[in-house]
Image (cartoon, rainbow, N blue to C red):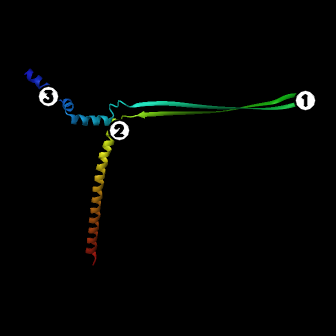
């Protein structure tokens, strides 16, 4: 009984082994994993920061002088300081993404755009038939009511 149970466990259905042994199923699983971005291994983020500081200072002195008996006196000194400070911070961020993921998503876009065109053509055909039916019913009602 134990041997039968061990053989049953060892030979049982293992979906991982099935996917690994079948190349087509493996490729489908790989596409889905790449699209979801679970294992993005070649994404690199480079950051560069640059700061520019500009400081302007203006000093203005106003001095009033007075002359008394050949002597010069400073009667009033007014000092003004104007300071302007400008800080510019530029951060450049460059992101290099996973090309396999981009290619897989572009392939999906191509397939879906073909489907969209087909459905759009079907919708236009159905709209034409709907308009013809409505016009036909309208004309039929018009001629039935007309005395």
Which quadrant would the C terminus be assigned to in this image?
A: bottom left
Residue 55 location (% of width, % of height): 64, 31
For image coordinates 57% across by 34% down, the residue present is: 88
Residue 10 location (% of width, % of height): 14, 25
Disc 1 element? strand
Which quadrant would the N terminus be assigned to in this image?
A: top left
Q: Is residue 35 above or below residue 73?
A: below
Residue 68: image tag: 1
For image coordinates 28% across by 71% down, the residue present is: 139
Disc 3 element? loop
Residue 44: image tag: none
Residue 102: image tag: 2
Foreground of the two, 66 or 147: 66
Q: Is 58 on the left or on the right of 101, as rendered?
A: right
Judged by depth in the image, the label closer to the viewer, 3 or 1, is 3
Foreground of the two, 145 or 85: 85
Q: Is 3 on the left or on the right of 108, as rendered?
A: left
Q: Residue 146: which quarter of the image?
A: bottom left
- Disc 2 crowd, CA 10 A, few/some/many (<14, 14-19, 20+): some
Residue 61 location (% of width, % of height): 76, 31
In space, the residues marked 1 and 2 are separated at their CA atoms by 88 Å
Residue 70 location (% of width, % of height): 91, 28
Disc 2 element? helix
Q: Residue furthest right?
A: 69
Q: Determine which residue is flagged by label 3.
A: 12
Is the Cβ of the residue at disc 1 closer than 8 Å to that at disc 2?
A: no
Work out whether mark 3 precedes mark 1 in sequence or the reverse, and give the earlier one: 3
């Amino acid at each position: 009984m134990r041997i039968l149970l061990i053989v049953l466990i060892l030979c049982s259905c293992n979906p991982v082994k099935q996917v690994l042994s079948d190349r087509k199923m493996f490729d489908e699983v790989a596409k889905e994993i790449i699209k979801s971005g679970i294992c993005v291994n070649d994404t690199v983020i480079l950051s560069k920061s640059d700061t520019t500081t500009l400081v302007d200072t203006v000093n203005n002195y106003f001095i009033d002088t007075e002359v008394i008996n050949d002597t010069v006196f400073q009667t009033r000194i007014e000092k003004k300081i104007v300071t302007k400070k400008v800080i510019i911070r530029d951060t450049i961020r460059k992101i290099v993404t996973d090309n396999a993921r981009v290619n897989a998503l572009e392939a999906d876009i191509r397939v879906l755009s073909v489907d969209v065109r087909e459905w759009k053509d079907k919708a236009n055909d159905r709209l034409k038939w709907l308009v013809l039916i409505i016009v036909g019913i309208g004309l039929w009602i018009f001629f039935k009511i007309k005395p």
